[in-house]
Amino acid sequence: MRVAVYCGSGMGKNPIYAEKATELGTVLAQNGYGIVYGGSKIGLMGKVADAVLTAGGEVVGVMPTHLQMREIAHPSLTEIHFVESMHIRKAKMVDFSDAFIVLPGGGGTMDEYFEVFTWAQIGLHEKPVILYNINGFYDLLLQHFDRMIEEGFIRTDQKSLIRVAMTAEDILKFIK
C-alpha cells in the first residue's frame, strides 16, 4: 500500500514540523506503507522521504520537468517519474496512492489537498484524505469547514470526509 504525502517544500518556522514529518515517514515505513510524493529533496518533502528511505520503505517521486531543472529532485528514491505538468503530476499521484496525508505547507499543498478532497466529495474516489494537524496548523481551516457546513456549501453527510489526525498513530488508524 502507498500513501500520497502532500507537504511544504519549505521547513516552516517551527522545528516541530520537520520533527513530525520525520516521525511520520518512519512510522509509515515501519508499518509497511510506501509513499508517493512530489520527488523533492528539500523542505518537509525531503524530511518525509529521507525518513521512509532510512526505515527501509519505498518512496516514489512524481515531479514536473520544470522543477527537475531547478535541481531539487531527490537523488535516492526507489523510483521517480518526470512528467510534463502539475496536472499530470497530481493525477499520477492519485493513481499511485491508496490514501492521502496532508502535512503543513503552502499554496501547492492546499491545491493538492482540495483537489483530492473535492474528488472524494463528488465520488471520484473513496480513498481517505487526512489533514495532519501538527501544532494546530489546520485549526482555522477546520473552523472554515464548519462554516461551509453551517452555510450549506458542504453537505452535513460529507463531514466524515474531513479527517483530522493529531499524531502519526491517528493516521495509521485512518489508513488501515
Image: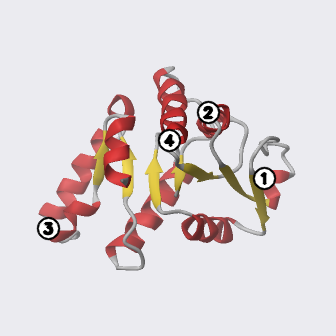
Give the residue number, with chain letter if any, for mark 1. Answer: 67
Give the residue number, with chain letter if any, for mark 2. Answer: 55
Reading the chain from its start, which is encountered first: label 3 or label 2? Answer: 2
Reading the chain from its start, which is encountered first: label 1 or label 2? Answer: 2
Give the residue number, with chain letter if any, for mark 3. Answer: 156
Which x, y percent locates residue 108? Answer: 56, 53
**Where 55 sits versus 112, above or below?**
above
Which x, y percent locates residue 154? Answer: 22, 69
Q: Residue furthest bottom?
A: 123
Reading the chain from its start, which is encountered first: label 4 or label 1? Answer: 4
Q: Quadrant of residue 175?
A: bottom left
Q: Is residue 35 left or right of residue 102?
A: right
- Crowd tier of the residue under label 2, counting other residues whose Cα lies within 10 Å: few below 14, some 14–19, many 20 or above: some
- Crowd tier of the residue under label 3, counting other residues whose Cα lies within 10 Å: few below 14, some 14–19, many 20 or above: few
- How many marks the image carries: the answer is 4
Q: Residues under labels 1 and 2: Cα distance? A: 27 Å
Give the residue number, with chain letter if any, for mark 4. Answer: 28
Q: Residues under labels 4 and 3: Cα distance? A: 31 Å
Q: Residues under labels 4 and 2: Cα distance? A: 9 Å
Q: Residue at x 24, y 56 (%)?
A: 145
Reading the chain from its start, which is encountered first: label 4 or label 2? Answer: 4
SS state under label 2: loop
Amino acid type assigned to the residue bearing label 2 in the image: Ala
Q: Check residue 171 in the rendering and tell me which mark sits there, or answer none.
A: none
